[in-house]
Amino acid sequence: MNIMVVGGGGREHAIIRSLKKNPAVTTIYALPGNGGMAEDAVCTGISATDIQAISAFAKENAIDYAVVAPDDPLVMGCVDTLEAQGIPCFGPRANAAIIEGSKAFAKNLMKKYNIPTASYEVFTELDKALDYVKSAPIPTVIKADGLALGKGVIIAQTRQEAEEAVTDMMANAKFGASGSTVVIEEFLTGPEVSVLAFTDGKCVKPMVSSMDHKRIGDNDTGLNTGGMGTVAPNPYYTEEIARQCMEEIFLPTVNAMNAEGRTFKGCLYFGLMLTPNGPKVIEYNCRFGDPETQVVLPLLESDLLTVMQATTNGTLSDTEVVFSKKHACCVITASAGYPLSYQKGLPMTMTEEAKAHTYVAGAKLSEGKLVTSGGRVTGTTAVADTLEDAVKEAYRLAQGVCFEGAYRRSDIGRRALQAKN
Ligand code: AMP
Ligand code: GLY
């Protein structure tokens, strides 16, 4: 079988390594992929948002199955285009990917179908948004409507900050067109949990829960990033909470999308906050999370390709999705300066041992040698019987990833370990 994976980060590297375990898989192409995953996939360099080139590549290379991993091509309709040429795909069509593509859509869906989330208002006019902010409870949360690379969320601690954020988004186009509509919502508190779930539009099979570490600095300080590390499972997510989420959030969301004529197939990501008033949805993503995938897939015992195909074919209820009872920890190694400006093109090395446990996100081959090319460069994952051992081992292995200025948080997993004790 020829498989094509659209995307080129650590998440895609983890997906490719899992797909490779199926003996029916002959070749995996990555679009674009990156130099650090060249041993696991044929990296094509084709941009993940060049839908025309992706479609042409699929035709020319007799692709049997496609996995579209990042948000932009999903929202742009990559799956619709590939399906129209007869290629079965993992991932939602554009009319369902809107659950991530528009925060206003997601919030209105939750309100209409009574799915617990922060209370909110949607604004398309600056004056009205500014008026609202004058009396909104502080802190307040301001979100650009569209995709903004995870940066379109401002938690305003003062009224002035809130006014500035609204003005930046709506009048100064700080997040481009994605900020012409804003959602202003209630500030929630409680532990955060990420739950990725397979769904074929009929049944929902949640994966093991995980915990992201979004801030750049230890003890959750400093700027927001794409994620500096993850652990799975998330100790706050008890079996009882899982049952409650299935009943109040997961199934109602899938049913709501069906009722709207927007059946969602693929991986639906629930960003949850466990508030004193029960679990609430912070965000939906229409895809696997990054770096959540780098701890979730190493714990998947079932065959990933089989499960993915079942979501495409609508046979997920008959398909086993089994996770190991072990623990996983992923530690990101980033370029010095990330998430602001950072140097690229620095030579990097990985010990053989580290390489076997590392997913590469931001690296490329230059004259046959690996050099850095992004902010988050690698994610190193260890699996162990206890969370403590997984954390220790992930840090030990990550030290085998070397380049000038390599930066890692030193406390990935600490909060989860404290929660367990
Ligand atoms: P997002 O990009 O939507 O994942 O938001 C980034 C981060 O902002 C989340 O991981 C939360 O920590 C925080 N956040 C988003 N919405 C809220 C909210 N309503 N209340 C408190 N924190 C929030
Ligand atoms: N780690 C959060 C995300 O993938 O959006």
Image (tube, helix red, strand yellow):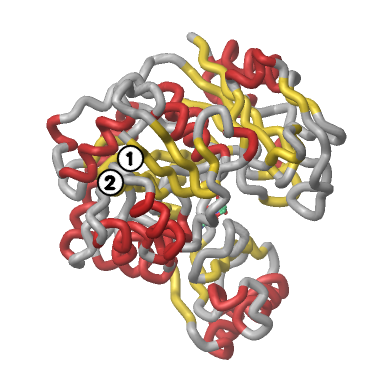
Query: Residue at the front extreme?
Result: 60
Residue at left offset 36%, top offset 39%: 3
Beta carbon at label 1 within 8 Å of ligand 2:
no
Which residue is nearer to you in this view: 68 or 190? 68
Are dots 2 and 1 in contact, CB under 8 Å? yes
Q: Residues within 10 Å of mark 2 (few under 14, many from 20)?
A: many
Residue named by callout 2: 250
Q: Is residue 351 above or below residue 219?
A: above
Residue named by callout 1: 197
Q: Is residue 12 above or below residue 131?
A: above
Residue at left offset 61%, top offset 75%: 176
Residue 318: assigned label: none
Q: Secondary structure at mark 2?
A: helix
Residue 89 spot, x, y in % from top left: 29, 48
> Quarter of the image holding residue 376?
top right
Q: Residues within 10 Å of mark 1 (few under 14, many from 20)?
A: many
Residue 208 spot, x, y in % from top left: 38, 29
Which residue is nearer to you in this view: 103 or 200? 200
Q: Looking at numbered disc 2 in the image, what kind of residue is underneath it?
A: Phe
Q: Looking at numbered disc 1 in the image, what kind of residue is underneath it?
A: Ala
Q: Earlier in the sequence, mark 2 or mark 1?
A: 1
Residue at left offset 34%, top offset 21%: 323
Q: CA distance from mark 2 to mark 1?
A: 8 Å
Query: Ligand 1, what quadrant?
Result: bottom right
Question: How many numbered markers are drawn?
Answer: 2
**Front: mark 2 or 1:** 1
> Quarter of the image holding residue 230?
top right
Residue at left offset 14%, top offset 35%: 317
Q: Which quadrant: the N terminus?
A: top left
